[in-house]
Amino acid sequence: MNIPSSILTLLLGIGLTLVSLWYGQNHGLMPVAASEEAAHIDGLFNAMMTISVGLFLLVQGVIVYSAIKFRRRPGELGDGAAIEGNVPLEILWTAIPAAIVLWISIYSFEIYNEMGGFDPAANGAHAMHSMPSGKGSAMAATMPGMNDAKDNRIAALGVGASPANQGKAAAVNVNVLGLQYAWIFTYPEANVTSGELHVPVGKEVQLNMNAQDVIHAVWIPQLRLKQDVIPGTPTQLRFTTNKVGNYPLRCAELCGGYHGSMVTRMIVHTPEEYDTWIASQQQATQAQAEVVKQTIAMNPANLSTSNYLAPYAKEMGVKPDTIAHLHHEMSEMNMSSIASATK
Ligand SMILES: [Cu+2]
């Protein structure tokens, strides 16, 4: 059987293209996509994966083929043929990568624009304005750098509204504070503070972010979003989730010894569940304020230790006799340490 080499090359080319296209869609390297923005990012990633697999197979295929086909045979001692370069070939393999890189750069610019990455300040400043007066704006005013961005029109950093939503405020605004080694989420509209990020599915969410000490970064892989959180410079992320679930939110900027533990959760609720959560948090805040008021009202000097600790113990689910026991043990420990010190 004798197949012409041009047909064989054509068949190999078609096969290589099909394998690349298939793998580009089925690599399984990405976690669940839980936001509208994620689809754009995955489109770009899959396109680059397709190209990379094609190039990898082509280059590796030629290497393996040549290593076998042109290996030194027994008794062969001479040099190989002297080949002096090939101008058309040089032009071809410079032009193809140049075209691919140019296309990828245009494609990724387009996606970044669609996500609102180019001019987040266009809506970021408005979003700060649109917060109701009271706690929210007081907090915004105390965040360093927030006012600079508003008054001096310094471009905000991050991902803003998509061109379609430009000028509109997001449905949910959350102030995010990163500090060594935790995240604090404040909902200025609802006057709620949380250690986890709760958002309603299908609604536009804007994170207004700031750092207290060093540079941190918010990274939510399922949203395909990552943004540095910088002391003194406000940054923002704006997104719309589309899958109810429970996703990790971790710090992606080495920020100190316990950077690795700077991880919390983002919970995407149904809108009803989200309202319930907000209401429950507001109740908890009120109950806490009540406990503080009671504690201030009583004079600890008139109380025994277990009486003084009783309201806290109740909250923590500790029985009063446990405290009494603990108190007894601790005084014994103190006695023995005094005794050993005086020896
Ligand atoms: Cu951090």
Image (tube, rainbow, N blue to C red):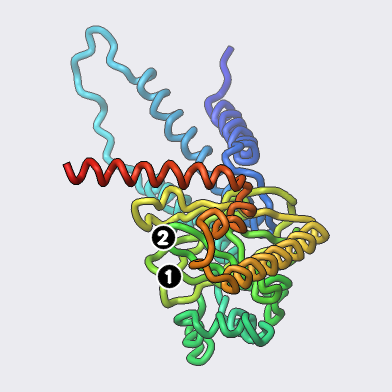
- Which quadrant holds residue 213? bottom left
Q: For the residue labelled by badge 2, is the local secondary structure a helix, a strand or a loop?
A: loop
Q: Is mark 2 within 8 Å of ligand 1?
A: yes
Image location of residue 196, percent across then percent down? 60, 57
Image location of residue 267, percent across then percent down? 67, 53
Residue at position x 74%, y 51% in the image:
244
Dot 1 surroundings within 10 Å: few (below 14), some, or many (20 or more)?
A: some
Above or below, 57 relative to 176: above
Residue 176 seen in the current view: yes
Measured in 3D between alpha carbons, the distance from the residue under mark 1 to the one under mark 2, in whole angstroms, is 8 Å
Q: For the residue labelled by badge 1, is the local secondary structure a helix, a strand or a loop?
A: loop
Name the residue beneath numbered marker 1. 212
- Which quadrant holds residue 72? top left
Residue at position x 75%, y 58% in the image:
201
Dot 2 surroundings within 10 Å: few (below 14), some, or many (20 or more)?
A: some
Residue 116 seen in the current view: no
